[in-house]
Amino acid sequence: MKYYAILSAVIILILIAGANINTGIAKADQGQQATAYQQADLKTGAQLYDNWLKITGTKPEGNHPLYPSDAKKSGTSTWRCKECHGWDYIGSKGRYRNGSHFTGITGVYNVRAEKAESLFNGLTRKETQHDFSEYLSRSQVWSLVKFLREGQAAIEPVIDGKGQAKGSAIQGKALYDAQCSSCHGADGNSIDFKSSKEGVQGVGWLAKDNPQESIHKIRWGHPGSKMPSMLADKGLSEQDAIDILTYCQSLYSMEQR
Ligand code: HEC
Ligand code: HEC
């Protein structure tokens, strides 16, 4: 009897120790993830969302496996987050609900409240077609997760249904002259975005043509260029960014007169 009592006491002790080791590992894991998330960089995440291929210098073969075969784009552009989920982050509910970028894929705006860990898994789970772990480092994925949770902003306060920016052009002019004109010129045309087409397609043109893309660039900068992020590098607010966009649109209107 005594022997059994000792044996079962030993077994119980082993079980308790085992459970402690397990929870210990789980805690260490959580701790590492929390640190990885804290160290992740919002601007990096936003620029990866825009064009991670440019930042990593990778060129995957063919179309992304989730890109619909009847949609209109092909090749590397089909791998960009924005191509499937939109500049306005609302996918098929937003700008890409029709036209040459239509895919029918949902947006990511509603994942803001999701756990960082589950978003991380959604971008790295091996057996899925949505696995980016082959192309992105863990810290890059954490930065994307941070952007998804903390960097996304609603499009409704930015533009109305017709794409007209809702801010103050007067406030925007002062900010534009201070933050943008040194590179893009006072008229917005010093850098031509699409030199193949006739006429200059500068800041004013893009603000009218694609305010959703423009506001993302104003907030976060342009990947692979010296353009700073107004939110992360210059400490401006979302309202400042909207005001800048509004002034940029007025630059184009001035040109048309
Ligand atoms: C080729 C298209 C495509 C690309 C590129 C793409 N995704 Fe997705 N993504 C999808 C599809 C399809 C789903 C599933 C959506 C659904 O359930 O309808 C999805 C789902 C998601 C979800 C979960 C959405 C939800 O509502 O639960 C997140 C977050 C996400 N993607 C982020 C990203 C990020 C970040 C990138 C860039 C690294 C990216 N995606 C690139 C097609 C794409
Ligand atoms: C230090 C120089 C610099 C500053 C300051 C700067 N930009 Fe840029 N911007 C660039 C460069 C370079 C590009 C990339 C152009 C290219 O490769 O087509 C760019 C790209 C852009 C794009 C995207 C074009 C595209 O093809 O998608 C927009 C929109 C833009 N800038 C607007 C602005 C606005 C508005 C400001 C001020 C808030 C600003 N930029 C400040 C240099 C700058």
Image (cartoon, rainbow, N blue to C red):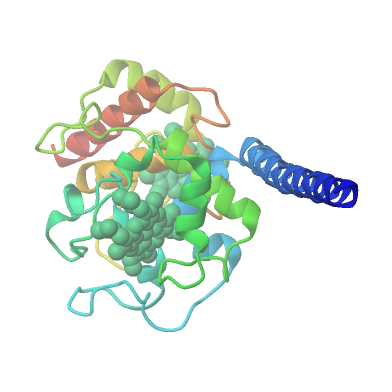
Q: Is residue 135 above or below residue 221?
A: below
The reply, left or right, for residue 198 in relation to residue 39 is left
Residue at position x 18%, y 54% in the image: 92
Asked whether 224 or 201 is in front, the reply is 224
Asked whether 120 or 208 is in front, the reply is 120
What residue occupies the far bottom of the structure in this picture?
61
Q: Is residue 246 above or below residue 80?
A: above
- Look at the image and tell me whether residue 195 can be seen: no
Residue at position x 20%, y 24% in the image: 166
Image quarter for ligand 1: bottom left
What residue occupies the far front of the structure in this picture?
1
Residue 163 occupies which quadrant of the picture? top left
Residue 75 percent coordinates (x, y): 37, 78
Residue 172 percent coordinates (x, y): 34, 22
Residue 13 percent coordinates (x, y): 82, 44
Residue 169 occupies which quadrant of the picture? top left
Q: Is residue 48 above or below residue 237?
A: below
Residue at position x 18%, y 50% in the image: 95
- Look at the image and tell me whether residue 108 can be seen: yes
Residue 201 percent coordinates (x, y): 30, 53
Task: Give the mark count.
Answer: 0
The reply, left or right, for residue 219 in relation to residue 12 is left
Residue at position x 66%, y 43% in the image: 36
Residue 168 occupies which quadrant of the picture? top left
Quarter in which the C terminus is drawn: top left
